Image (cartoon, helix red, strand yellow):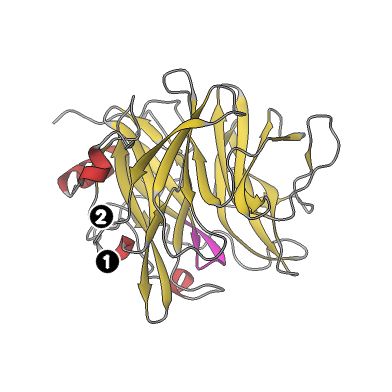
Amino acid sequence: MSKVTIIGPAVPNVPWQDKPESLNGAPVWRYKENPIIGRNPVKEVARIFNSAVMPYGDAFIGVFRAEQTNGIPFIYLGRSSDGIRWEFEEDKIPFTDEDGKPFMPVYAYDPRLVKVDDVYYIIWCQDFYGASIGMAKTTDFQTFTRIENPFLPFNRNAVLFPRKINGNYCMLSRPSDSGHTPFGDIFISESPDLVYWGRHRHVMSKSSEWWESVKIGGGAAPIETSEGWLLFYHGVTGTCNGYVYSIGGAILDTDQPSIVRYRCENFLLTPEEWYEERGFVGNVTFPCATIHDAASGKIAIYYGAADTYVGLAFTTVDEIVSYIKDHSVTRESDTEIGKR
């Protein structure tokens, strides 16, 4: 079998821990010293979780969902030399409008961080007369300029692709309602300029598998591989004690990413450790970012745990793509182009 490769830059200092010999199931293993971010990490911040990181220079940078002690979430900036130990700015990120005037969201949570060409984009969920998607851009992590909101409410879980596809920016999202949405599919939209969005197409629906039977949503930014776009997403099930969030995996077509080529019927990670099962919202593993090295195929997955902590897990592109393909079950709504 030919080796699966990551299409992208080398990141030789990608955080890493070797796979334990006793691992069963999916080839995704947790960092032994999890969680990497605990409670009360910053002044007036109770918890950091559901956050996104990426390489920056010879080190790493991230945008972090910081739940303040007053209960209002905002996005804070963090830096790390190794991707594991993080230092945070004491103040929330100061977003501005295009004229450089302060323009802060009412609240902001579940950020993603994606580099396209030479620009870094932050995407988050916010209030736009209802839950919707906010965006900003930066080139230096000193100034952060808001971009027009891409979609109408209600919408969550927006994830930008790390390069243009067929000349357009592409973004995954999960249309929803105004509450704790009891439904949801993943869609993809395109834009020539990050202002006007269209060509909305369906990508994936929830499935009959127990761990994603209620709703699904985007997670980390897709990783381009020789087999297609590797997507770590979240799937939700309902129990008598509330929702449970697990991490799933799929591979989207390189040129037509509304088409799902492979979709793993099994979860890749589900709440099992104390920091995933117990917290402000128990039983949550919520992927938001990866750091991946094209040279070695190593992938570090960052995920929110129990709406309280940040966890770190590992895999390799060869192992995870093979596992997804070997356990793939796709349905008509996955493999069709996504328009009706």
Q: Nearer the viewer, residue 37 or 67?
A: 67
Give the residue at mark 1. Answer: 210
Q: Residue furthest right?
A: 101
Amino acid type at circle 1 is Trp
Q: Is residue 162 left or right of residue 208?
A: right
**How far apart in space, not on screen, are marks 1 and 2 (Cα)?**
16 Å
Residue depicted at 60% across the width and 65% down the height: 38
Q: Is 249 one of the magenta-colored residues?
A: no
Magenta segment: 304-311
The answer to whether residue 319 of the structure is visible from this angle is: no
Q: Nearer the viewer, residue 254 or 325?
A: 254
Q: Residue furthest front?
A: 340
Residue depicted at 55% across the width and 35% down the height: 114
Give the residue at mark 2. Answer: 26
Q: What is the secondary structure assignment of the residue under circle 1?
A: helix
Counting other residues with Cα less than 10 Å from the Cα at mark 1, is it few (<14), some (14-19), or many (20 or more)? some
